[in-house]
Amino acid sequence: MAEAYPWQDSLWQQMAGRPRHAHAYLLHGPAGIGKRALAERLMASLLCHNPGSLNACGECKSCLLLKAGSHPDNYVLEPEEADKAIKVDQVRDLVSFVVQTSQMGGRKVVLIEPVEAMNINAANALLKSLEEPSGDTVLLLVSHQPSRLLPTIKSRCVQQACPLPSEAMSLEWLAQALPDCTDEERAELLTLAAGSPLAAVSLQVQGVREQRALVVDGVKKLLKQQQSPTQLAEAWNAIPLLLLFDWFCDWSNLILRYQLTEDEGGLGLADMRKVIQYLAQKGSRDKILNIQDWILAQRQKVLSKANLNRVLLLEALLVQWASLPGRN
Ligand SMILES: [Zn+2]
């Protein structure tokens, strides 16, 4: 049974309580807030043979088959490997599932996540199933980046926005999910996760707070010339490149912002505030804009999984960063 999150209560009532269901829904919103869980919960409820309550009963034949992963009328389409594309052949298999009649006499339900993992051929293959509804089939499309979807896909779905929970609600939930962290640590994780509570939990599990502490300490030593770019590039060996580029990008933003506003409330997480202030005072605006452009361009390469020499790239970043306080 998919987990029910407190920030989805009214969304759930609204979606599951519809007197008639649409042929296709597009659930969209930021990653890490439980859209997949909401879709799975809806899938179970749509397949359940016991009407009467919004939630699936968990006991009927349909619920038991779903739990066992052997329900004949349910289909989950996702990339075969994490972060890879959904292939056109996978979509063709789905299309032939959609045209079959239901084996248990009820609805058929399809879940696709993330929809943006389909390339244009795969998306076009899916369009036919969206255009020509087949019997009692409901398609649940989940997207973290709806701006990347074909307009023809979006227009054929009932769109359901799934908003980020409020900070207060996320922190309340995190208090239960991460009981061993302090309030301050939970708030820090939530900031690092851009407000997504489930992402905050996975950051904690991945040890991101420890990694951040290592990087912040390294940046301070770099600026004091106690450690070289080469030493740091090696010491940060286990830290995901994208995470590093996200942090440096974030820091360059904070420096530029502080130069303009001198607002001490806008210095980001406590661990880097002094460094941000120092670099804002010592570094020229041009230099910081240059390094930011460079970071954004490299980040794009990291995202596109280009073949990069990790150590060389980090050294190049750190050499530039170390030169920020200088005159040239
Ligand atoms: Zn049931």
Image: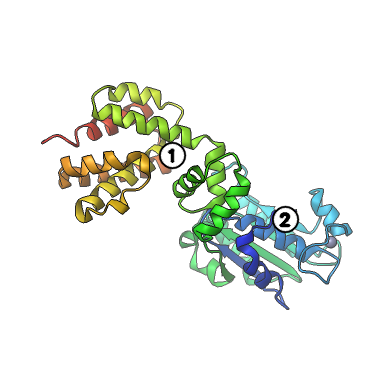
Residue type beneath disc 2: Tyr
Q: Indicate the position of residue 40 as horizontal and vertical percent values.
A: 70, 57
Q: Quadrant of ligand 1?
A: bottom right
Label 1 crowd bin: few (<14), some (14–19), many (20+), radius 10 Å: few
Amino acid type at circle 1 is: Lys
- Asked whether mark 2 lies closer than 8 Å to ligand 1, one says no
Position of residue 52 relative to residue 269, above or below, is below
Q: What element carries label 1?
A: loop
Instruction: Find the residue positioned furthest to the bottom.
Output: 19
Residue in the image at 17% along x and 47% along y: 285
Mark 2: few, some, or many residues within 10 Å (few <14, many ≥20)? Answer: some
Image position of 323 with respect to 24: above or below: above
Is 195 on the left or on the right of 229, as rendered?
right
Q: How is the image coloured?
A: rainbow
Distance in Å between CA atoms under marks 1 and 2: 30 Å
Q: Which mark is residue 62?
A: none
81 to the left or right of 17: left
Which circle marks residue 75 in the picture? 2
Residue 105: x %, y % from top left: 86, 66
The residue positioned 22% from the left and 56% from the top of the image is 261
Task: Work out whether residue 258 or residue 180 is closer to the camera in this orientation and state it.
Answer: 180
According to the picture, the residue beneath numbered tag 1 turns out to be 305
Answer whether residue 118 is visible to the viewer in this image.
no
| In the displayed structure image, the side of residue 140 where residue 257 appears, left or right | left
